[in-house]
Amino acid sequence: MTGKKNSRFKECLKYIVVIAIAVIIAFPHLIMTTYAIPGADDFSCANAVSIYRENHNMVASAIAYTRDVYYTWQGTYTGEFIMGMEPSVRESFTAIRVILFLSVVLFAASLIMLVYIICKRFFGLSSSKAIAVSLLAEFTAFNISVTGELFSWYTGMAVYTIPLIAVLFCLAFSIISYYDGKLIYAILASVFGVIGAGGSLEVVGFGCMALLVLLVVYTMGIKNIKANIRRLIFLYVPFVLTVAGALFNTLAPGNFVRQESMTNSGSFKTALITSFLNFNTHVSFILTTYILPLVLLVVFIICICSDSKISIDGSKLVLAVIGAVVIPVVTIFPVILGYGSYNVDAYISSSRVIYIFDLVISLSLIILDGILALYLKELLRRNNINAKEQMHKYLILVIALLLVFSGNVVQNYNNGMSGRISEDIKGERMHIVSERFTDVYRQINEAEDGTDVYIVMPDDLPDTELYVPLYIEQPEYFANKEVATYYNVNSFTRLWG
């Protein structure tokens, strides 16, 4: 009895330690959400939904708003529905911050779950090693690119972050349903797939392509199709429903209306070529700017020194390389095609777009890294070489070489978002900016209805990784107009002080 209690205690302690590490990794982003301020589309959405709210409850008005946007602007039904619910929390910045806080938690949970399942089911790693790789993936996800628009802006969270979370859960439950053969997991995968398909087409492209790669990998690995038809159905149904949701999103009448209002349009061939070029540029940038090389080394060592019995042959390795290239390319392709912006870094909404792109590239590299390690492990085994023993001998040397040739590791960490957000928080830059914009909204709210409001804002506000709304000296600018409409004043003009 005592032995069982000790075993349960150790198990609970392990979970507590893992959760604590996951929270520590996400901590800077969790704190960033507490400074979040609304702006731009947050107010335009609130103004639009208020029309429907007069005669409907919160959910009904959100559905009506989503339907209207679907026919007039874009097909992102999940994002628009979440945005349509926003006016219920817009009156309180605290409520928005709580929702953004939860989105960070869900993102970390979904990412850890997916990578853990891949490590356990596909790599054959032990639970402890799978958890280690999962936490490294989380660490990477919070330390690349700019994350402010995804984790500190309600609109960015609605259209990008929540659908991305749904796609990650969809992929995880699809793998589980294949191995466990339980209907409930296939249902969950399908539900999350449909939710994810209602987000930005960049997220949708990632989800559909990743599911397709899963189908190819597992279908190729089954010798007796008839005997495993149930397991395959549990993979194909979520894929078909996700693609159906993606088509519903892509073929929305509003997408074509919006396209007509844009001056640029891309050709399929040029967009495809440019997607590959952007992939090459971003791989180089990620591997030389952030701390990912060190993560890849640790993941490689974990996998090659594991007791995994999974055999990776040359065909699987080639397929993994193709998937690691194709998935990111398909992810960014809709953005380049739709906006005719052949340099994705110059795209006006590049912050959230680039983050999704870099995240997918990083995850693809981590998974490819693990597959390569298992492939080399298999080659060594065939030559009667124990990789685990050899790696233990040269581990210190390998890490030392990496530290020498990868540059300043601390500097690379500081280049990432967690390091930069931490500096913002310690320097109180986020606090200053958040308080200043909160005071602006307070002044507008307290102004007399129908008046012209002029507010002086210092032009030396500190730079911050927090999402910061843009207001200018022109009252007819769309963001200024939406704020004025929301607070029932005639106009709002920002003056520079």
Image (spheres, rainbow, N blue to C red):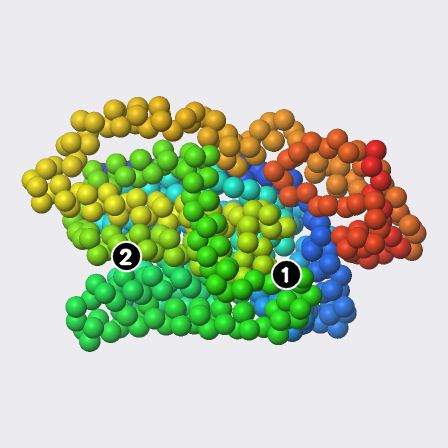
Residues marked 2 and 1 touching at CB (< 8 Å): no
- Using the image as rendered, state which of residue 371 and residue 128 is in the foreground: 371
Taking the spot 40% from the left edge, 64% from the top edge, the residue there is 189
Q: Is residue 150 visible?
A: no
Mark 1 secondary-structure assignment: loop
Q: Can the viewer see residue 227 in this picture?
A: yes
The residue at 71%/52% (across/down) is 40
**At x 54% / y 69%, what residue is drawn?**
249
Question: Residue 108: x and y, percent?
Answer: 45, 46
Quadrant containing the N terminus in the rendered view:
top left
Which residue ends up furthest to the left in the rendered image?
A: 384
Vertical arrangement, residue 482 with respect to residue 431, above or below: below
Labelled disc at residue 264: 1
Residue 237 location, quadrant: bottom left
Q: Position of residue 418 (x, y in %)?
A: 51, 35
Per the image, the residue denoted by label 2 is 319
Amino acid, disc 2: Leu
The quadrant the C terminus occupies is top right
The image shows residue 83, relative to residue 425, as above or below, that is below
- Report the side of 104 relative to 90 (left or right): left
